């Protein structure tokens, strides 16, 4: 059975929207870590907005980004959407009861199923108890405004710290697992 792993860039104040602010903190160590996560994955699970942005960008990036882009482009993708009618970029649209659909996706794979960004999807899956790992890339910057990973009104969830990764730029990855 696959493992749902959410990878989320956040600022110190919890902002995840438009993470251009991560640029100054990204270096070769970050790239190596991200590549390891991507190459360990069996599939991607994306919300519609993230999917559309990634599908527009990644197919043109193979020359500049090499094997990372090739892997990104060839992995199977599952796009959770109530409005998207069809998907390209090696993707299928997920509709219906989210818990049932995610369970079926997990049954298809043995390894990680990565969620990139996709804040609404990540929150929905956390509330349903379907996120197995949450990897928060905490960047040492206060953005001040923007969409937050856990908006006001989010149900309480307890996590345990399974590990950390520190980068020389000050970015810290917290590897969290749900309690229970």
Image (cartoon, rainbow, N blue to C red):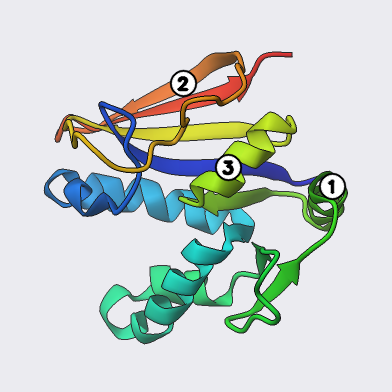
Whether tag 3 and tag 1 are in contact, CB under 8 A, the answer is no
In the image, 174 versus 35, the foreground residue is 174
User: Residue 171 placed where, x, y %?
Assistant: 24, 32
Residue 103 badge: 1
- Residue 123 appears in which quarter of the rendering? top right
Badge 3: how crowded within 10 Å, few (<14), some, or many (20+)?
A: many
- Real-space CA distance between mark 2 and mark 3, rounded to the nearest whole angstrom: 20 Å
Q: Which residue ends up furthest to the front in the rendered image?
A: 153
- Real-space CA distance between mark 1 and mark 2, rounded to the nearest whole angstrom: 26 Å
Residue 164 badge: none
Residue hosting label 3:
122
Badge 1: how crowded within 10 Å, few (<14), some, or many (20+)?
A: few
Whether tag 1 and tag 2 are in contact, CB under 8 A, the answer is no
Residue at horizontal 78 percent and vertical 55 percent from the top: 109
Residue hosting label 2:
163
User: Residue 10 placed where, x, y %?
Assistant: 33, 37
> Where is the N terminus found, in terms of image quarters?
top right
Badge 2: how crowded within 10 Å, few (<14), some, or many (20+)?
A: few
Residue 99 visible? The answer is yes
Can you tell which of label 3 and label 1 is closer to the viewer? 3
Whether tag 2 and tag 3 are in contact, CB under 8 A, the answer is no
- Real-space CA distance between mark 3 and mark 1, rounded to the nearest whole angstrom: 15 Å
For numbered disc 1, what is the local secondary structure?
A: helix
In the image, 110 versus 125, the foreground residue is 125
In the image, 137 versus 33, the foreground residue is 137
Residue at horizontal 39 percent and vertical 23 percent from the top: 164
User: Residue 4 placed where, x, y %?
Assistant: 66, 43
User: Residue 112 placed where, x, y %?
Assistant: 64, 48
Work out whether mark 1 precedes mark 2 in sequence or the reverse, and give the earlier one.
Answer: 1
For numbered disc 2, what is the local secondary structure?
A: strand
């Amino acid at each position: 059975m696959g493992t749902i792993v959410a990878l989320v860039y956040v600022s110190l104040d919890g902002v995840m929207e438009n993470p251009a602010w991560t640029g100054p903190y990204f270096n070769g160590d970050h790239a190596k870590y991200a590549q390891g996560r991507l190459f360990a994955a069996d599939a991607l699970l994306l919300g519609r907005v993230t999917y559309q942005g990634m599908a527009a960008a990644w197919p043109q990036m193979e020359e500049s980004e090499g094997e990372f882009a090739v892997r990104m482009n060839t992995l199977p993708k599952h796009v959770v959407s109530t409005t998207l009618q069809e998907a390209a970029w090696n993707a299928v649209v997920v509709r219906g009861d989210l818990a049932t659909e995610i369970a079926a996706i997990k049954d298809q794979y043995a390894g990680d199923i990565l969620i990139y960004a996709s804040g609404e999807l990540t929150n929905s899956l956390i509330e349903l108890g379907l996120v197995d790992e949450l990897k928060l890339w905490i960047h040492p910057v206060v953005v001040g405004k923007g969409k937050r990973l856990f908006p006001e009104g989010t149900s309480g969830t307890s996590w345990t710290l399974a590990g950390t990764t520190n980068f020389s730029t000050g970015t810290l990855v917290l590897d969290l697992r749900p309690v229970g």
